[in-house]
Each structure stands twice: as C-alpha cells, then as structure tokens.
Image (cartoon, rainbow, N blue to C red):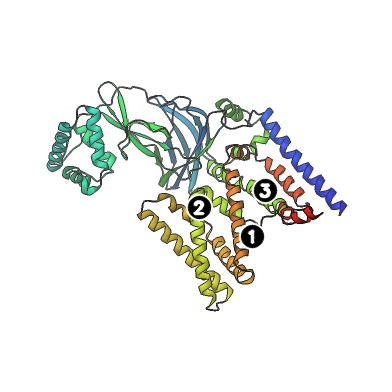
Amino acid sequence: MMASRTQIGLIAGTLFLLGVGLTLYKAVVLGFPLLPGEYRDVWTIESKINFKPTKGPVQADLTLPSNQAGWVLLEEHFASSGFGFTVVEENGGRDARWTRQTLENSTTLYYKVQAYRPTDTALDNIPPPPIHKPMLEGDQSAAMERLIGLLREQSSDTESFVSLLVGEFTKDRDAQDRDAQFLIGTFDEPEKAVLLAVLAHAGIPAQEIRGIRLEDGRRRQTLSSLLEFYTGDHWVIIDPETAMLGMPANFFVWQRGSGAVLGVVGGRDSSLEFALVSNSLPAKTVTGMEQKAHAYALLDFSIYALPVEQQGAFKGLMLIPVATLVVVLMRLIVGLKTSGTFMPVLIALAFLQTKLITGLSLFLILVGAGLWIRSWLSHMNLLLVSRISAVIIVVIFMMATTAIVSYKFGLDRALTVTFFPTIILAWTIERMSVLWEEDGWKEVLKQGGGSLIVAVLAYLVMTNALVEHLTFNFPELTLSLLAIILLLGKYTGYRLSELYRFRDLDKSA
C-alpha cells in the first residue's frame, strides 16, 4: 500500500513539475501571456484550396490580402509540397502562385495569415473605376429606368438612393417592386451582380469587397461580399444582405475590387475554404513566436503548429481535462452522486454550444419525455437492445421536432439541440429507468440532479476566460491536472457529504 502511494506520488510530482515548468518556460522565455485580456486579439486565418487535375501543366493563383481597413498582417505561411511557388506583385496587389508540370491526384494547397486590427480605419479613398454600363434587352432597360426613377424621387442623395435600392432587393419577393422582381428573374446572375448592374446604369461607381466574417473556431467558411459605392468625394460601404451601412466590425477584407480571388489552370472542381481561430496574444508576441519557430523546437510541437481547422477543434478539446477535474472533485471530495462518471462532462460540452439556460431546458425536456416513453416500452417486455434502439429513435425524433417547432416560433437558440450526444442521452434515459425500477424515484433525482449540478459547475469553469486562455496557450498544464487527479485517486478520507450525514454523531460525542 505504501509502495503504491509512493509510486503515485513520484509520478504525480514529476507530471506536475513538468507541466508547470513548460508553462513557465513559454511565459518567461517565449513571451506567452499568462493572463488574458492584456493583449490584442490576433486572428489566424487559413485558406485551403482544393482541386482535381486535368491534362497538362497546373497553375493556381490566389489573391492575397493586404493591410486594409485597419487590419495589420503579422506573418504569412504557404504550404506547397511538390509545387513551385512564387509571390507575384501585379497592379498594386499580390498573388500567390503554385505551379507544377504534371499532377495526377486531387491536391490541397494552404495559405495561412495572422492578423490583428489595432485601429478601425476606413478604406483608402482611391479614385473610382470607370463605369461600364451593362448590355440590356429593351424590357430590362425599361424596367431599370423605371426602378431608378422611382428611387430617385424617394431619395435625397446618392447614399440614400443606394440604401433604398439595396433595401428593395433584400425584401421578401412578394413585397418587392415589380421591376426589381423582373430584373432579378431575368438576370442569370446573383443579386449582387444585379445591384452592380443597376448602379452602373444609374451612373454610380460601385465595386465588390470580398472578405471573411470572423467567427472563432469556424471551419469551412467561404468568402462573403460587401458593396461599396462612390458618392462623388468618398466611398461608402453597404451590406447587400442587410442594407446596413458601414464596415462590419467582424469583417476581414481579403480583396477590394473586381477580379477572381482564385484561378486554377489545368484543374477542375476548385474550391476555396477558410478556417478561423482567435487568440489573445499581442502582435509582438505572435511575431516573435513566428520568428523563433525554428530556434525553439518546443513551438514546432505546440498547438500553433497544427492547421487552423485542428486548432479550433483542440480549443474545445483542451477544456475537457478541466471538466474532468471538476467531476473528480465533486465525486471524491464532495461525494455528489452522478449518473455515470463522465456524463456530466458530455452535458457540459453540449452546454458550451447551446448556452446554459437553453441547454438545461432542452436536457430536462428530452430526458423527461424519454423516461415516460421508456416506462411505456418496459410494459411491452422488449429485449434490452431493442428497447435502447427504440429510445434512440424516439430521442432523435424529439430533437428534430423540437428544432422544427423552435424554428417556426423564431427561437433560434433551441436549434442547437442537435449538439446533445444522442446515444448518451438514450443510454441515460435507459439507465435512469432501470434505477427508477430498482431504487425508486428518489435515487433518480439524486443522480440526475447531481449530474446536472456537476455539469453546470464544469460549464462555468470551462467558460471562464482565464481557463480558456491557459488551456489553449499552455496545453502542458494538462500534465499538472493529470497529476492532481492521480493524487485524488488515492484519497480515502471522508467526503463532505458524509461529514454532513454523520453530523449528529459529532454532536453526541
């Protein structure tokens, strides 16, 4: 027994010191911040180009972003295994160019940039491009003239005219002006292209701004578009989807003006996707980290060395050990009963997506309804496998019904019901049903309530800004958490619940 305790103590001590030591090394030597909020948010944006080859040489051109609208590019990385690579500067812009003589299989090319926005400034007031009026049929020209004339009467200047025009195109189809409906129906192009055609016909210089709507942890993001028009002395930006004026705060400008962002020669079925992740490192720290990547091997084996899509996934995964520590503390030290060991962790992970109040409500509704259905199935004397399978199907049906009804009533938050682990929910319902039959409803309330309490506590810890910051920037602290859990595994003393239970003995003594 003593040898076992000594062994666990040595292992736990080594792990704890290793985790803390690596953390201090990164904080002191490499300049990683120990506290969140004291540095700017830095976005890592990774673009992924996919395409299939055809016959002949292959060339892929990707328009690269530049410092616009207050954004500052810190560092860029290109992945071009087996390809020749150059950065071409043309017409004041930059293009990444990958080339290869022959290619047999589908391929993926990567471009990663780190950027932050120290100031929220306007785009440069460049001269407007020449206006090229569209070639129109007679009925299209007449409809465009009538629509422009109507909006001219209702507006006072160029800005209000464009706002009314975009607002007309964002209305429901039944509420749109007849001429706007006709133009959308006759142009074999997206509505943004129709808007640009109307503005050109009205003699208003306009162009498209392509960029990315920033959302932390988002994967498979595609380019979004804004429109900007020239009022005579300056440019004004408008969102063609909402008719809101101004640059959105979460919009990263990738390209300003016409031209394709991605061009592939010698390939087909090309696509461009983006993965995003945000961190609180300061600009100088990120720059220093990139410069030291070859000098410090530790960074080559950190989360920052992973593709951005995997970084976003690990940002959530690294919170699981923290939730596990909460479960261990509540069960071994407090003595709280739960339905399964790690069921509270899974519920807490679901709460991260649904938010706490919505997640609690959905969980109680699904489990309550599932218990009622399970009690009805028990009277049919089904085998265990068939019974659980039936509960899984019913749970999925209830989740789908909840999502549909919520959507119809405009409760978008309830649509996140799909984040609940379906199989675990079904098994929890089955387990609570058996517990109800064997030990009664009081035991179900104890274990079910205990699971929810632990899940809520785990959620509150996982959503703490300091915890999120430390787990992502210092994943080696997981070793220290493991050391604490190993030490707690040797705890054989009284639990807090037992001290409360035997409080009368202490009074009598």
The residue positioned 84% from the left and 52% from the top of the image is 4
Q: Are marks 3 and 2 in contact (CB under 8 Å)?
A: no
Q: Hey, which residue is sitting farthest top in the picture?
A: 233
| Residue type at tag 3 | Leu
Image coordinates of residue 223 in percent, x first then y, are: 40, 40
Q: Is residue 340 left or right of residue 10?
A: left
Image coordinates of residue 234 in percent, x first then y, are: 30, 22
Q: Is residue 377 left or right of residue 200?
A: right
Q: Is residue 249 left or right of residue 28?
A: left
The image shows residue 32, relative to residue 365, as above or below, that is: above
Q: CA distance from mark 1 to mark 2?
A: 19 Å
Q: Are marks 1 and 2 in contact (CB under 8 Å)?
A: no
Residue matched to label 2: 359
Residue matched to label 1: 340
Q: CA distance from mark 3 to mark 2?
A: 22 Å
Residue nearest the observer in this picture, 151 or 358: 358
| Residue type at tag 1 | Gly
The local crowd at label 2, few if under 14, some if 14 to 19, many if 20 or more residues have their Cα within 10 Å, is many
The image shows residue 154, relative to residue 419, as above or below, that is: above
The local crowd at label 3, few if under 14, some if 14 to 19, many if 20 or more residues have their Cα within 10 Å, is some
Image coordinates of residue 501 in percent, x first then y, are: 72, 56
Q: Considering the numbered disc 3 on the image, is that residue within a helix, a strand or a loop?
A: helix
The image shows residue 152, relative to residue 436, as above or below, that is: above
Let me know if residue 132 appears in the view. Answer: no
Q: Is residue 178 left or right of residue 64?
A: left
Image coordinates of residue 291 in percent, x first then y, are: 60, 27
Let me know if residue 134 appears in the view. Answer: yes
Residue matched to label 3: 325
- First-in-chain label (1 vs 2): 1
The residue positioned 67% from the left and 55% from the top of the image is 336
- First-in-chain label (3 vs 1): 3
| Residue type at tag 2 | Gly
